[in-house]
Image (cartoon, rainbow, N blue to C red):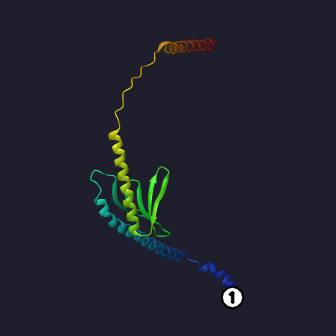
């Protein structure tokens, strides 16, 4: 019976905040190591893709300033292609995700498991964007000059007179009402 009493009293005495803090620190350190390893892996994979795309970016015409190959070591790490699109690594599957930001939110344009597939898709995307801009610029250059249309202002005949009359009547009515309220409030 004495052993049972000692067992009941013992758990409260065996708890130690110092030990709990030590365990919590160890768990956090392990979690941070795992997170750092994952992040380092993402950055390394994006650096491989960046190296693959550097030759493509070297061929961009000097006049085209839309594209820039920038690796941002954010969380998640991102390899920016232009102002709106970037590549990230999916946490679950480890696949490359080609993502576009827009006013409607983020949209995954393409997903690939290999560097070559993603590099091909990004190259195709860039080519399509360059062609689209060339087409838009050509449409602006070839647009026929617009003829100037002369719009004659409408006559301000009776419309302006009515507005002016209403304003004057409003001022007179307001002044009369103010005078009447002062006259009636004085004993």
Q: Secondary structure at mark 1?
A: helix
The residue at 31%/60% (across/down) is: 57
Q: x, y (%) of residue 165?
A: 52, 12
Q: Which of 122 and 26 lies nearest the eye of the viewer? A: 122
The residue at the far left in this view is 62
Q: Which of 9 and 95 lies nearest the eye of the viewer? A: 95
Q: Which of 28 and 144 lies nearest the eye of the viewer? A: 144
The residue at the far right in this view is 1
Location of residue 148 by image quarter = top left
User: 95 above or below 148?
Assistant: below
Q: Which of 49 and 140 lies nearest the eye of the viewer? A: 140
The residue at 59%/14% (across/down) is: 177
Question: What is the number of callouts on the image?
Answer: 1
Quadrant position of the N terminus in the picture: bottom right
The residue at 44%/69% (across/down) is: 113
Location of residue 186 by image quarter = top right
Badge 1: few (under 14), some or many (20 or more) residues near its Cα, within 10 Å? few
Question: Can residue 166 be spotted in the picture?
Answer: yes
Q: x, y (%) of residue 88?
A: 43, 63
The residue at 68%/88% (across/down) is: 3
- Which residue is under mark 1? 3
């Amino acid at each position: 019976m004495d052993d049972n009493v000692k067992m009941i009293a013992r758990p409260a005495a065996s708890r130690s905040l110092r030990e709990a803090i030590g365990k919590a620190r160890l768990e956090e350190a392990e979690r941070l190591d795992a997170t750092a390893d994952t992040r380092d892996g993402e950055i390394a994979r994006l650096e491989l893709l960046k190296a693959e795309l550097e030759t493509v970016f070297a061929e961009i015409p000097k006049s085209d300033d839309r594209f820039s190959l920038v690796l941002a070591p954010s969380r998640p790490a991102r390899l920016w292609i232009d102002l709106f699109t970037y590549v990230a690594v999916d946490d679950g599957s480890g696949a490359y995700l080609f993502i576009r930001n827009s006013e409607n939110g983020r949209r995954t344009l393409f997903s690939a498991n290999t560097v070559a597939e993603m590099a091909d898709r990004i190259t195709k995307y860039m080519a399509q964007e360059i062609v689209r801009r060339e087409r838009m610029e050509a449409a602006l250059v070839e647009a026929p000059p617009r003829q100037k249309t002369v719009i004659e202002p409408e006559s301000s005949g009776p419309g302006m007179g009515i507005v002016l009359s209403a304003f004057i009547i409003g001022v007179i009515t307001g002044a009369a009402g103010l005078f009447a309220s002062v006259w009636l409030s004085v004993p």
